[in-house]
Amino acid sequence: MTVQRSEEDAAVWPLSRDWLRGTCRRELLPVWLVLGGWTVLWGAYAVQNLLMRSWGIFPMAARILLSGGPSGGLHLYSVRPDFQFGPVSVLVAAPLAHLSLHGSKWVAGVLMTVAGLWLVAVIAGSKARDVGIPARRPLLVGGLLVMPVWPLLSLTSGHLDDVLALGFGLFGILQVQRRNPVWAAALLALAVDSKPWALPFGVALLALPRTQWLKAAAVFGGLVAAAWLPFFIADPATIAAVKFQLHISYGSVLSIFHLSGPIPPWVRPAQLVVAVAIGMLAVRAGVLQAILLATVAGRILLDPAIASYYTAGAVMVAFFMDRTRSWRVPWFTVAVVVLLWAPQLVQLGNDWYVVTRWLRLLWGVGTLAALVVTLLRHGRPVAQEAGQTAA
């Protein structure tokens, strides 16, 4: 017979009328009040000294892209090879480029913060394959853990590209689980077109039935090419953006191994290999959320920078991963909060970088190892999920 599903487990899509009605039901109102106040509290803390320090590069890129001449339009990345974000991020920022810088900071900051709370609600209602209306406990626990960290990304740094990459990646995974190859491929491609580090997310498409692989690959490859190729065709000097090298900061995990100066050529390929390898295990085990966490963990472990907003992405995808498990305590999320975020609240001078880079090493290696063990122990491949709703 068919298993009767509760309202909380019903498959609905976020922002649909049913989903919005469900998230506003009476028993969730106290939770929303708590999380709203909690978010405002940590948002105020995040901006007390600095508001969106990096936001200005996005409206600047939009103005360059929408202008003409040899230093505008599709010459964007040859003119500014340090802009390491994708065209989708530029286009999303374009409407705000008409506002004053200060005004656009506040509008973008509020929107990205609300988007973080929305993603928490979506994750709180996510199951193995469906998106349901969030239950009270997961929503409260997730919000209390995630929202103190998220303002590092949405309000302190203002990195629109990471918000878009994480959001598109999350929804792309959900569409793969719903066996929708076109939307899944489109959303995962938009993640890559927002920020190139999201490229390993595409591994999730292998979880689709083999008959859908060609369609998904065509959509994914087509949208990635459509976003990036025009810049290389219009201006071959755009290759300079690919060759652009960051320098290894003192707090990077790489500095533990006495690396300094420009980033070694093996770092980016190593990040890709780690994410793809664990991503393949995730596809085999049917735990696609692990692809996002493995990508972010590999980035933090091997990145030359020590940007605090990386932690915001880590806590969000860790919560997404925790929702696949039956644990009462979301251990992956707690680990991010304890090892990556809490130490950032302590200001002990440059010597503190020595401690925090070891904590990043501990978290990165520990998270990747835990993912491998979890995925190898997960005995239910994706193909078997189709029979979950029948008994």
Image (cartoon, rainbow, N blue to C red):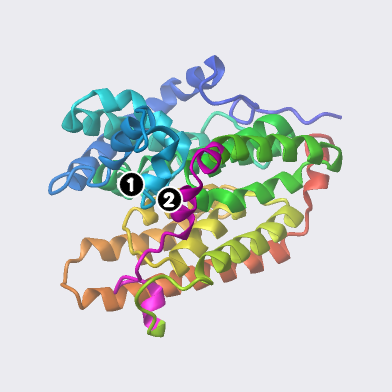
Range of magenta residues: 230-256
Position of 25 compared to 281: left or right? left
Is 334 drawn above or below residue 77 in the view shown? below
- Quarter in which the N terminus is drawn: top right
Residue 107 appears in view = yes
**Residue 153, numbered label:** 1
- 278, 144: nearer the viewer: 278
Q: Secondary structure at mark 2?
A: helix
Q: Mark 2 highlights which residue?
A: 313
Residue 214 in the image: x percent, y percent?
A: 80, 39
Quadrant of the rendered image containing residue 276: bottom right
Q: Which numbered disc, 1 or 2, marks the residue that appears first in the sequence?
A: 1
Position of 101 compared to 189: left or right? left
Q: Residue furthest left?
A: 49
Residue 252 in the image: x percent, y percent?
A: 36, 71
Is 52 drawn above or below residue 175 in the view shown? below
Is 257 drawn above or below residue 223 in the view shown? below
Amino acid type indicated by mark 1: Leu
Q: Residue at x 71, y 33 (%)?
A: 178
Q: Residue at x 48, y 20 (%)?
A: 20
Label 2, residues with CA under 10 Å away: few <14, some 14-19, many ≥20: many
Quadrant of the rendered image containing residue 273: bottom right
Residue 121 in the image: x percent, y percent?
A: 47, 34
Q: Residue furthest front?
A: 70
Quadrant of the rendered image containing residue 111: top left
Count every numbered label the image shows and give the total: 2
Residue 361 in the image: x percent, y percent?
A: 43, 74
Residue 170 appears in view = no
Amino acid type indicated by mark 2: Gly
Distance CA(mark 1)–CA(mark 2) = 8 Å
Indicate whether residue 68 is drawn in magenta: no
